[in-house]
Image (spheres, rainbow, N blue to C red):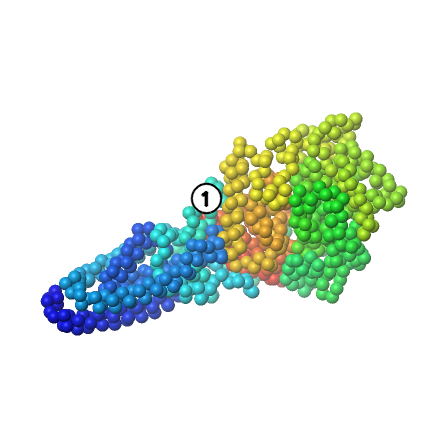
């Protein structure tokens, strides 16, 4: 233009006036953009952040170009600001699911660290603008024309529109991936932080090229809070397993709680609401309270009084064994009057609320042995037992001193305590890094296992009667019995031979009972019978020790590590089991008075002692061969390693930080479908224990779990579990419900989940979208809090919390009435 031909002074005045006008327009535009940014998170549905690599580069190129051209046009400024703000808001949403680290990792913290540089960049832009204004006096002939600037701005508008259009297309493609997350627990750290949201809105789009976030997160509409303002570069996600059942639940980070929703989302929610309303009535899906003789302590398979009355004999404790009703109950067990949230571990080991387990018979009968005492509103557990009145720890250390090879927490990691009482032995073995499976029958020792579980000590209700215990063969490092009242010597030693099945070759049987140290005729008779039996079984007497403080004797036996002794016996009594007898078969299998041979092949489980704890938890068992196919289709060792890596990632990046769980309240945990025990292994450093359940119709991986230094049990989820009501803080079910609903009464399974879960207890379900929907409706009918649901590619996650709600109407369970 002709302006370049005028004098320097005129040029300065003209340029100054022009720049003033541009500055005013820019200030006004920035104000408008700022107002839009402050209101967009609550009034405008966020765009999909699944922007392609090309779009990211394109937008960044426009920003750079705008800086070079001195922020030419207010329209350009507004367009770029909108895109930048939109991307910044989306990238700032926290990733709270499977691959989310919770505590921000390196990539995530880049978002926070970039806040200051981004603001400095804006200041640099202002300074550059002033500098360019001054330089215009010397660049009269090199300035762009107004027409060129206009054309430039229009091109950028078109580019921005193209980006928005492409974003919209990608948003439609990701619509199947949805999450709804509700408030975190009361008194817990809330993962939603409005301060962080403000920080996010200030961030620019100067992130690394190629970052990609997938899916949608819907926040709790009551609070309408947005997620933490952290950004994270998503790791390349790959399927841990080829099976759809184990497909990864990817990071999700785009909000879906704006003013506008999609037709697909609205229609889906309406269908679910209609389905839910059909199933619910005033009492909640027809739920009723179980009216039984056992009341709040009802265990369906142990309180089937009708079946027990029909037994022809109770000589072998048949009446203490499982007798599951043909039609499992679908009613809900009532709460004890005055029930309140359980005391947290480790305080719970010493005391629990009386009203949670309102039984005093044991305190009256066993109080002098320091089992349990009543003290006001508490039940107190001094840590004693029949054989260790002065405390379990002294007793535990006495055993170690008598047989140093036991090496608690190193060589000896997994223990079976038979006739455990209130499980103080197992409770104090935690201090020696030992995991103890405590068992005792539901008998006249009123609620002993319930006391144990309320204290936060693992235990089940079971009896050594006519059937094998529900564990595989050769898995326990030590079996312990302290005055457990089991007639080991009777009927050819059938019950002691069951312990022989369960013990690892080279494992120890620790027996503390009166026949060891008393000379009463009955005790002498039992001792002589036990000497004869253990010699015939080739058990070595390692130690017979007197505990002077407690005034008891302790005998320690060792199971052989070879078959040499068996072959040299003059009589085949007890006989060796047939080769066809599987020592791992344990579900409703009758006991037999025989011994299984010791494995000797180097690749056979039981031929070697496992690695010392804790090395064994990570190590692939030596007997898992590459020639064998694992549960998920890979060679067994690779399957094992992949499963562990999967659950370590899920636990670390999702469960521990992304769900809002206060883990200090979680002690008793159950993995309802454990496979290799990877979930429990990933939690091993937490102050909790995990009961790994392997369903009877699933691949038998329970021996692998024990080999890792963990423990578990076989179970049929069409029946009730052998535990008291309200005994678990958290249940984890990975593709369990979809596999059981075609075989079991689905409502009965949910009723059982309600029975064993404590009020305020949690459940995490990973399953098909269809199953997740059914469970969500049932949980809602139970008045549970649905804290989060998530779905992607027909797979979903549901996190719910049980409440104190109980229905008013009762249902008489006829077979459980005395």
Whole-percent x and y of residue 634? 50, 37
Q: Quadrant of the rendered structure where residue 537 is?
A: top right
104 versus 498 height, above or below? below
- Residue located 71% across and 55% down the image: 451
- Residue located 47% across and 54% down the image: 100
Other-residue count near label 1 (Cα within 10 Å), few / some / many at <14 / 14–19 / ≥20: some
- Residue located 17% across and 73% down the image: 13
Whole-percent x and y of residue 279? 53, 56
Label 1 sits on residue: 239
In the picture provided, is 30 more to the left or to the right than 352?
left
Whole-percent x and y of residue 324? 67, 46
In the picture provided, is 428 more to the left or to the right than 771?
right
Q: How many marks?
A: 1
569 versus 559 height, above or below? above
Whole-percent x and y of residue 276? 50, 57
Residue 18 appears in the picture as rendered: yes
Residue 274 appears in the picture as rendered: no
525 versus 61 height, above or below? above
Name the quarter where the N terminus is drawn. bottom left
20 versus 719 height, above or below? below
In the picture provided, is 662 more to the left or to the right than 268?
right
The secondary structure type at the circle numbered 1 is loop
* Pick the front one: 516 or 213: 516
* Pick the front one: 392 or 761: 392
- Residue located 81% across and 51% down the image: 550
Q: Quadrant of the rendered structure where residue 36 is?
A: bottom left
């Amino acid at each position: 233009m002709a302006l370049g031909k005028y004098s320097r002074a005129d040029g300065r005045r003209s340029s100054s006036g022009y720049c003033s006008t541009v500055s005013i327009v820019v200030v006004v535009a920035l104000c408008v953009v700022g107002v839009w940014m402050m209101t967009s998170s609550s009034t405008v549905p966020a765009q999909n952040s699944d922007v392609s690599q090309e779009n990211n580069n394109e937008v960044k190129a426009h920003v750079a170009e705008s800086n070079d051209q001195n922020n030419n046009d207010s329209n350009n400024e507004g367009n770029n600001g909108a895109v930048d703000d939109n991307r910044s808001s989306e990238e700032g949403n926290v990733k709270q699911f499977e691959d989310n680290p919770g505590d921000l990792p390196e990539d995530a913290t880049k978002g926070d660290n970039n806040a200051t540089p981004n603001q400095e960049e804006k200041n640099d832009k202002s300074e550059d603008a002033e500098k360019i204004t001054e330089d215009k006096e010397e660049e009269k002939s090199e300035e762009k024309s107004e027409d060129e600037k206009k054309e430039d701005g229009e091109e950028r508008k078109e580019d921005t529109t193209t980006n928005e259009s492409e974003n919209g297309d990608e948003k439609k493609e990701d619509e199947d991936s949805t999450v709804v997350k509700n408030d975190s627990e009361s008194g817990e750290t809330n993962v939603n932080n409005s301060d962080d949201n403000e920080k996010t809105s200030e961030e620019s789009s100067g992130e690394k090229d190629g970052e990609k976030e997938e899916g949608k997160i819907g926040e709790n509409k009551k609070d309408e809070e947005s997620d933490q303002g952290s950004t994270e570069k998503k790791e390349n996600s790959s399927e841990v397993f080829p099976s759809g059942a184990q497909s990864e639940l990817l990071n999700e980070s785009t909000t879906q709680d704006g003013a506008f929703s999609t037709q697909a989302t609205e229609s889906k929610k309406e269908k679910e609401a209609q389905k839910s309303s059909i199933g619910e009535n005033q009492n909640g899906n027809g739920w009723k309270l179980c009216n039984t003789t056992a009341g709040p302590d009802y265990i369906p398979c142990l309180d089937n009084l009708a079946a027990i009355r029909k037994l022809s004999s109770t000589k072998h404790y048949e009446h203490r064994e499982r007798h599951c009703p043909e039609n499992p109950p679908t009613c809900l067990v009532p709460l004890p009057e005055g029930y309140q949230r359980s005391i947290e571990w480790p305080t719970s080991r010493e005391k629990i609320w009386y009203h949670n387990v309102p039984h005093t018979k044991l305190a009256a009968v066993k109080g002098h042995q320091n089992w349990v005492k009543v003290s006001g509103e508490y039940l107190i557990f001094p840590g004693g037992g029949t054989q260790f009145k002065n405390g379990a720890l002294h007793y535990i250390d006495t055993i170690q001193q008598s047989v140093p090879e036991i090496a608690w927490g190193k060589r000896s990691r997994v223990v079976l305590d038979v006739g455990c009482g209130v499980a103080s032995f197992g409770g104090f073995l935690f201090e020696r890094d030992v995991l103890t499976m405590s068992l005792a029958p539901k008998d006249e020792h009123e609620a002993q296992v319930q006391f144990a579980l309320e204290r936060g000590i693992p235990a089940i209700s079971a009896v050594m009667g006519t059937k094998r215990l529900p564990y595989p063969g050769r898995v326990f490092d030590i079996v312990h019995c302290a005055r457990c009242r089991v007639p080991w010597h009777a009927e050819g030693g059938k019950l002691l031979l069951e312990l022989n099945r369960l013990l690892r070759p080279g494992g120890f049987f620790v027996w503390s009972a009166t026949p060891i140290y008393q000379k009463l005729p009955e005790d002498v008779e039992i001792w002589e019978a036990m000497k004869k039996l253990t010699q015939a079984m080739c058990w070595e007497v390692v130690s017979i020790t007197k505990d002077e403080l407690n005034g008891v004797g302790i005998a320690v036996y060792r199971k052989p590590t070879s078959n040499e002794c068996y072959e040299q016996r003059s009589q085949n009594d007890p006989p060796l089991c047939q080769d066809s007898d599987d020592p791992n078969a344990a579900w409703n299998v009758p006991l037999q008075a025989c011994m299984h041979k010791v494995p000797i092949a180097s690749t056979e489980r039981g031929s070697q002692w496992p690695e010392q704890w804790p090395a064994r938890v990570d190590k692939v068992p030596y007997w898992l061969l590459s020639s064998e196919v694992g549960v998920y289709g890979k060679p067994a060792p690779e399957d094992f390693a992949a499963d562990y890596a999967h659950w370590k990632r899920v636990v670390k990046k999702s469960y521990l930080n992304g769900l809002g769980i206060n883990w200090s309240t979680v002690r008793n945990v159950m993995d309802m479908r454990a496979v290799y025990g990877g979930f429990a292994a990933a939690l091993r450093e937490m102050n909790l224990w995990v009961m790994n359940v392997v369903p009877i119709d699933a691949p038998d991986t329970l021996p692998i779990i024990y080999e890792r230094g963990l423990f578990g049990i076989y179970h049929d989820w069409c029946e009730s579990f052998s535990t008291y009501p309200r005994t678990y803080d958290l249940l984890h079910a990975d593709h369990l419900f979809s596999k059981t609903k075609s075989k079991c009464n689905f409502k009965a399974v949910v009723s059982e989940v309600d029975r064993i879960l404590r009020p305020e207890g949690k459940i995490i379900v990973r399953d098909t979208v269809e199953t997740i929907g059914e469970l969500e409706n049932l949980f809602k009918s139970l008045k549970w809090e649905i804290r989060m649901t998530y779905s992607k590619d027909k797979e979903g996650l549901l996190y719910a919390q049980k409440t104190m709600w109980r229905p008013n109407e009762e249902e008489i369970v006829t077979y459980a009435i005395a």
